[in-house]
Image (cartoon, rainbow, N blue to C red):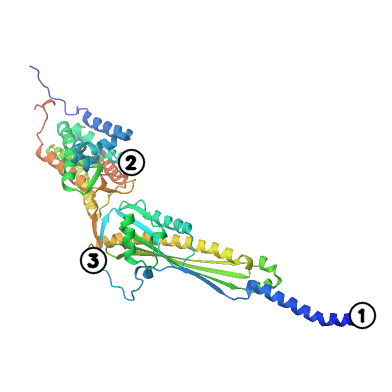
Amino acid sequence: MKTLTAAPAHAQPFPWASVCVIAFTLGVAAQPALAPTLLYERLALLRGEYWRFWTGHFVHFGSSHLYWNLAIFAVASIWSERLAPGRTRLLLVVAPGLIGLALYGLEPALATYGGLSGVATAMLVFLAYTQLARLAAAPAGTSKNEPSAPSPTSDRWFWRAVLALILLKVGAEFALQQPFFARFAPAGIRAVPLAHLIGVLVGTVMHRNLRGFRPRFLPRRTG
Amino acid sequence: MSSGSSSRARVFRPALYVALLVSALLLGGCFSTRGPRQTERSSSVVSYLYPDQANPLPPTSIPVLRLPLRVGIAFVPGKSDISEQQKTVLLERVAAEFKGRDYIQSIELVPSTYLRAGGGFANLNQVRALLGVDVIALVAYDQVQFTSNNLLSLSYWTIVGAYIFSGNKNDTQTLMEAAVYDIPSRHLLFRAPGASRVEAGVAAAYVQQRLRADSTAGFNAATTELIANLKLQLESFRERVKNAPGEVRIEHRPGYTGGGSFGASFASILGLLLLARACARHRA
């Protein structure tokens, strides 16, 4: 019988799921011919092309739209996957679909949607909550002896500020009905704050309700 | 014989002088003796929208703007000798100001042939049905050109002077106004004016040529000011809509394209927070 040994605390797993998602997003941007097949399109969804609930998030409306979304997503997702690989991978699978479904149900006027920011928001919120939970659980003063351990005194304010920034962005977008902190290069594209709000909710729920979740393919920690 | 011819010469000499004087007067008069002249070209939004109404009733319904908007831009029909080409150039400049805004879906330049003098909202509803626009920017203008003489115009008596000396003074005053209307509710959403004044001295022979050039320059300068004011009015209108939602209702048209987006500002703030965190950790 194979015995699973505990990995050292600082040995963090390779974030392959995040890398795959980033590569897929860049691939879609490099092959614009794929966009019509992958974009969230309400009419196509009504025809039964359900994959668009997931794939629409990986299509972007311009290089600026792509780069900034991807920059935020890459940092949040890789960081999260190194801290909580199981839940991050689950979030990467679930979040695009949930956001797509919510847009379908709650925003019937939305004909076409693209952009990774909803998923990136979910990831950033999840990362912030995960870090805050680690800080709450970590004994004070461990940071100097163990570099990978969180530093409760210096970090808590940071993750709270990240959460506040996201909430400010979403609130302002709902209030102003235009993208906050962002601009779309092509005219006629509106910000969809609902996607960000659903991202916040998905990230929060994933952290709060699945704190003990660990997929079977990951080794169990002991001790 | 000789005394007869000399007496004839004596008789004709004053007549010759008189004839020369009259010719000079007439020729000089061709250029200058008519005094100040005035040319006017204008169109009026009020005469177009309310042709036979002395006291038009204010609209009662609240305008409902369905975003993204489809906007039309047109010159109000009027007493005009502006060419269609010139109108198109001016309208394109105004249209460029509306483009690139996420709440505007399309902008249609409405040709003059689609609008008839005194057509009113019935005419605008036809345009709405034909071109599918909801909001229209009606551009009206009033241009007056004066030509008067100055002291140099005395040189016109020499005829050659009418080609050399700038004895005429042209003064071109232009006022333009863009009034943006919501067609279904007949509400004036906002308006933006633009004015210009072009003055030029010119020789009598080139007055008409110069007046045409001044007219074009006047329209261009007034359009530039109108565009600047239009920007301010657009922003002010957005603020008004935000602060007084009862004044205008905003809805979203089914079938819009949306995107989720972070931007450079968000990434920069996040980057600064990360930097501050790194500094704090380093200090700790």
Q: Are the residues under marks 3 and 1 on the same chain? A: yes
Q: Does dot 2 land on a helix, a strand or a loop?
A: loop
In space, the residues marked 3 and 1 are separated at their CA atoms by 100 Å
**Chain of the residue under label 1:** B
- Total marks placed: 3
Residue holding disc 2: A62
Query: Image height check: is A40 above or below A222?
Result: below
Residue holding disc 1: B2
In space, the residues marked 2 and 3 are separated at their CA atoms by 40 Å
Query: Image height check: is A78 above or below B147?
Result: above
Residue holding disc 3: B61
Q: Residue furthest front?
A: B1
Residue A100, position in %: x, y?
19, 41
Q: Nearer the viewer, mark 3 or mark 1?
A: 1
**Chain of the residue under label 3:** B
Q: Does dot 3 land on a helix, a strand or a loop?
A: loop
Three-letter amino acid code at the position of disc 3: Ser
Q: Does dot 1 land on a helix, a strand or a loop?
A: helix
Does label 3 or label 1 sit earlier along the sequence?
A: 1
Horizontally, residue A139 falls left or right of residue A120, namely left
Q: Dot 3: within a 10 Å radius of its alpha carbon, few (fewer than 14), some, or many (20 or more) residues?
A: few
Q: Nearer the viewer, mark 2 or mark 1?
A: 1
